[in-house]
Amino acid sequence: MKARTLPLWIGLIIAVSLSAVAPGQDEPAGEIANATELLAALETADQDLNTLEAGIRYTRRMLLQGDEQIRAGTLYFERKPAAEGERAKRLFAIHFSELYIHPRLDVDPQEWIFDGEWLIERRPREKQFVKRQIAPPGETIDPLRLGEGPLPIPIGQRAADVLARYDVELVNPRVGLEEESESLRTFVADTWQLKLTPRTDRPDDDDFREIRLWYDQETLLPRLAKTVNRGGDESFVQLVGLRKNKPISSTVFNIEAPPAGEGWDVEIKEFRGE
């Protein structure tokens, strides 16, 4: 049975979060001369990453609708030790608190939690709870693994696997942000930018026509990610105030449905092998 893929925007956010710590993050990352060297540094990018917490700003721009939506909140990541012969389990939670649609700023809490098997969507204001089984029962998926997740990103993957799917370039950090604010361009001024485009000599099965990732030049911590899909829609994920390997409350990753009788609309969608 084939695992379902996560929603693309969830995959984007997870990809950025998992790129958070490169080997020897407490030491300067050293000079990176080209895209191949950066890919090599990212092959083991999550080896010493146990937990991560960061402020998140997620922007979506829909080309046809001429609409822009910005959500702000907190992102959490925790890696659980794996039993012998098994993968480490990766837990992700994104707790949004605000929604901005010009000119209105609204308090609109949303929680998205993924435990490798189940994806939870919780909307407290509407009292809606949806639990989707993404992987076959008892199995887990890695949302970044080539051929398994929705957004193949060079984090913890062999450089050769990435290069087999994408043309990869190391480009000036300001390129691709020409129409953005000066503050955003300043935000990435001291970063390396990695640009990925699907190779033309393989099947056209990629949902994105362009992926850009910005990494701090000293630590390889992520600053920003940008994608452009086939329809021209743009998404940005900006991370600030990253905290590595600090304790995170287990309640952050709670995937249990609300108790009956509290007025919630609860929907459980089990895996069907689609």
Image (tube, rainbow, N blue to C red):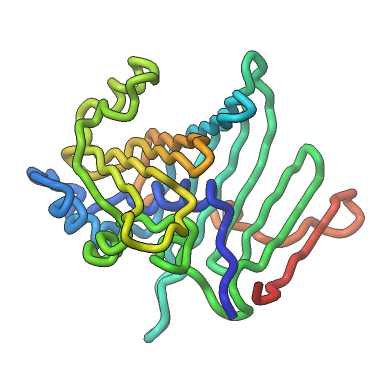
Taking the image as shown, residue 196 lies to the left or right of residue 208, namely left
Q: Nearer the viewer, residue 181 or 110?
A: 181
Q: Position of residue 29 (x, y in %)?
A: 14, 46
Q: Nearer the viewer, residue 132 or 33?
A: 33
In the image, is residue 149 above or below residue 138? above
Taking the image as shown, residue 176 lies to the left or right of residue 121, namely left
In the image, is residue 72 above or below residue 33? above
Q: Position of residue 65 (x, y in %)?
A: 64, 27
Q: Quadrant of residue 77?
A: bottom left
The residue furthest front is 201
Look at the image and tell me in which quarter the C terminus lies: bottom right
Q: In the image, what residue occupies the spot 16% across and 39% down?
A: 218
Q: Nearer the viewer, residue 221 or 152?
A: 152
Taking the image as shown, residue 191 lies to the left or right of residue 81, namely left
Q: In the image, what residue occupies the spot 41% across and 81% down?
A: 86
The residue furthest bottom is 85
Q: Position of residue 58 (x, y in %)?
A: 51, 35
Q: Nearer the viewer, residue 207 or 8?
A: 207
How many numbered discs, if any?
A: 0
Q: In the image, what residue occupies the spot 37% across and 40% down?
A: 242
